Amino acid sequence: MSAQDIDLAVGDITPAQLAKSVFRKRLRKAGTVTVGEKVKLKLEKRAATVGRRVKSHKKYDLLMVEAVGTLTSLDGERLVDFVRRAVIFLHRGDPIEWTRVKQSKDRIDRALSFLENHQRGSSPEREALCRNDELRNAFRDWATKANRILSKDRKVIRKKIGQKEATEKMVKALRRQAESKSSSGKRFA
């Protein structure tokens, strides 16, 4: 078509003809939810999720209560033995021993497992302590006792090392004296 033909054709179209040429279908919704139904579904979902976090934390809270209770019940030689075992377990632990402790039903082993998880920064154990101030303070008191025991052990070890070094110095001095006497005796002979 030429430009003149287009002008003629456009002039002939009326708005009624243009409206007839556009094909409109009615919108039919399928699978949609009304606002009332949507609100009802959200309320049901909210009701179902209430307390979910509390329920998930309950396991760790119970483990923490048992572990801190076990740790604070230890006293005397049992406490000293446990602290020494914990130091070895936490710093130079054997993977086979870790597995055994994790699967153990013994209260002391579970307390040791709790200490390991707490030291490694496992968030459920730390969060469990944060949620309960009374148990957190009891755990701090126990940790203070454990640190005192460890510092006493370190003092004993330092003392033994000092005695060993002093003994080695005395032995070296005696050897030097013996060597100097034997060498001076050979000069005069």
Image: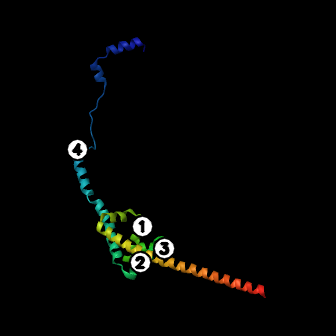
Which labelled disc corresponds to residue 119? 1
**SS at badge 3:** helix
* Mark 3 lies on residue: 96
Task: For the residues labelled 2 and 3, say whether their Cβ atoms are less than 8 Å apart.
Answer: no
Q: Nearer the viewer, mark 4 or mark 3?
A: 3
Mark 2 or 3, closer to the camera: 2
Q: Nearer the viewer, residue 113 or 156?
A: 156
Figure coloring: rainbow
**Spatial CA span between label 3 and label 1:** 19 Å
Query: Residue 83's spot in the image, x, y percent?
Result: 42, 76
The answer to whether residue 39 is above or below residue 91 is above
> Real-space Cα distance between discs 1 and 4?
51 Å
Q: CA distance from mark 4 to mark 3?
A: 58 Å
The correct choice, above or below, for 127 with respect to 17 in the image is below
Measure how far apart labels 1 and 2 are at the Cα level.
16 Å
Q: Position of residue 88 (x, y in %)?
A: 47, 74
Label 1 crowd bin: few (<14), some (14–19), many (20+), radius 10 Å: few
> Which kind of residue does numbered mark 2 sit on?
Phe
Label 4, residues with CA under 10 Å away: few <14, some 14-19, many ≥20: few
What amino acid is found at the position of numbered circle 1 in the picture? Gln
Q: Nearer the viewer, residue 144 or 121?
A: 144
- Lateral position of residue 79 relative to residue 19, left or right: right
| Numbered label attached to residue 35 | 4
Q: Earlier in the sequence, mark 1 or mark 2?
A: 2
Task: Find disc 2 in the rendering and name its residue.
Answer: 82
Label 2 sits on a secondary structure element that is: helix
Q: Would residue 103 be seen by someone viewing this image from the given angle?
A: no
- At 58% from the left and 82% from the top, the residue drawn is 167
